[in-house]
Image (spheres, coloured by chain):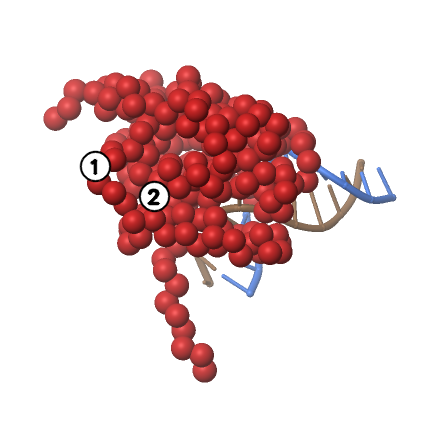
Chain colours: A red, B brown, C blue
Amino acid sequence: MDKPGRLKDEAISRRLERSFYARDAETVARELIGALLVRATPRGAQAGLVVETEAYLGPHDLAAHSSKGRTPRNAVMFGPPGHAYVYMIYGIHHCLNAVTDVEGHAAAVLIRALEPVAGIETSTQGPGLLCRALGIDRAHNGLDLTRDELFFAAKNSAEPLEIVAAPRIGVDYAGAWAALPLRFYVRGNPFVSRKERTRRPKS
DNA sequence: AGCGGGATTAGC
DNA sequence: CTAATCCCGCTT
């Protein structure tokens, strides 16, 4: 019923600014839950609610790409906050992150799952899948989330969400860092990337 | 120049 | 459980 572009205009008016991202990654990861991720394309806007994130705290965090030092691949993480860090993984998928914290402290928040809102035709239930659904690839690496076609809009604070903290996925190589509860998701939301593990009774 | 591996996903 | 598949990042 809405005129095309209406969602986009509304979202742009709520676009998160630099100061939102210029905080520690854990805070940003928590606060991005419930925000709207928008990609404005020539054919209209694609958008989804962020329902799952992970915080990568900085070079001291052994699960973070920045822990191995600055390289061409992760250079965006070392730059100013509020930019998109997009990398290819396993030769097949892309992952979208928002750079956080202060410039030089290479921290970021991985966007792991979205609840579709508009213009989305395939699954957004996982970091690689959501990038596919929104057409995000390495061409988007370094985009300014406060100015460019890819951005986050403030959540609707009227409906509080229950957020669960759990260990991050796929970072078992990171020793003790792998166990920290730096993954955040909306409790019970069906678009979270992995189902709650059903506890298997021990034999 | 060569080689190993990954913040994933789908399919057996 | 494992293949897929592409850079990247480090070693030779």
Query: Numbered disc 2: what chain?
Result: A
Tell me where residue A160 sits by quadrant. Answer: top left
Q: Is residue A92 left or right of residue A192?
A: right
The quarter in which the C terminus of chain A is drawn is bottom left
Q: Is residue C2 left or right of residue A11?
A: right
Task: Specify the label residue A51 is tagged with.
Answer: 2
Distance from disc 2 to disc 1, alpha carbons, whole Å, reads 16 Å
- Label 2, residues with CA under 10 Å away: few <14, some 14-19, many ≥20: many
Query: Numbered disc 1: what chain?
Result: A
Task: Specify the label residue A105 is tagged with.
Answer: none
Task: Specify the label residue A158 is tagged with.
Answer: 1
The quarter in which the N terminus of chain A is drawn is top left
Q: Position of residue A39 (x, y in %)?
A: 36, 26
Task: Specify which label sits upstream in the sequence, 2 or 1.
Answer: 2
Q: Is residue A173 above or below residue A21?
A: below
* Residue nearest the viewer, comparing A137 with A150: A150
Which SS class for mark 1? loop
Q: Is residue A145 above or below residue A159?
A: above
Q: Is residue A136 left or right of residue A35?
A: right
Q: Position of residue A134 (x, y in %)?
A: 38, 32
Residue type for callout 2: Val
Residue at position x 63%, y 42% in the image: A60
Q: Position of residue A61 (x, y in %)?
A: 60, 44
